[in-house]
Amino acid sequence: MQYKRILIAVDDSAYAMKAARAGFGIALPLKAAVGIVYVINKNKEVVSADLGITLEESKTLLLKEADKTIQQYIDLYNNNLEVFRFTPEGIPEKEILNIATEWEADLIVMGTHSRSGLDRILTGSIAEYVIRHAHTPVLVTPPRMT
């Protein structure tokens, strides 16, 4: 299969950095377009009357963090590829799939935190959800990838 559009799902973790490196590594020799998606997770929005943080200010801060993180990955790994940025707000696993469908991605690349046991039961696995529901191939980078 010829990959023309590679979607890389990222956040600000070391696991995402490995996924970004792998995704750009695949895209470069293929001269594929790269889409980078960083989902603004609604669960991380902080509103505090005591601190004077409104919902809009919280969203703005999260969006700035997303943009900064995406730019860091572009600066580190891009080598003249066409790059698209996506920063939807919502539930990460669902938004990754939505962007993959809307953008017509040929491959989704993402990292995993490799949670297990009770932590996985309580928090779920974004990577597992994406694998189970994607209509396109998914490459998951392992947490110990060098």
Image: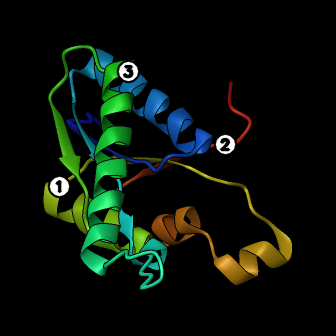
Q: CA distance from mark 2 to mark 3?
A: 19 Å
Residue at screen point 38% across, 40% down = 69
Lower sequence index among marks 2 and 1: 1
Q: Quadrant of residue 97?
A: bottom left
The residue type indicated by label 2 comes to Pro
- What residue lies at 27% left-to-right and 47% top-to-bottom? 106
Question: What whole-number distance in Å separates the C-alpha atoms at marks 3 and 1?
Answer: 22 Å
Quarter the C terminus occupies: top right
Residue drawn at x 80%, y 66% as measured from the top left: 116
The mark found on residue 77 in the picture is 3
Residue 96: name its quadrant. Answer: bottom left
Q: Position of residue 88 (x, y in %)?
A: 25, 65
Eye-nearest disc, 3 or 1:
3
Evaluate if marks 2 and 3 touch, with contact meaning CB atoms under 8 Å apart. no
Q: Position of residue 52 (x, y in %)?
A: 38, 76
Residue placed farthest to the right in the image?
Answer: 117
Q: Find numbered disc 2 in the image and state the secondary structure of the residue it sits on.
A: loop
Give the amino acid type for the residue marked by disc 3 in the picture.
Tyr
Q: Image check: 133 left or right of 4?
A: right
Q: Note whether 118 is above or below 99 in the view shown.
A: below
Q: Residues within 10 Å of mark 2 (few under 14, many from 20)?
A: some
Q: Is residue 37 visible?
A: no
Query: Residue drawn at (31%, 15%), measured in percent from left and top?
Result: 29
Q: Which mark is residue 104?
A: 1
Earlier residue among tags 3 and 1: 3
Give the mark count. 3
Q: Nearer the viewer, residue 60 or 94?
A: 60
Residue in the foreground of this view, choosing between 139 and 88: 88
Measured Cα–Cα span from mark 2 to mark 1: 25 Å
Disc number for residue 4:
none
Whether residue 88 is visible, yes or no, is yes
Residue that numbered label 2 is attached to = 142
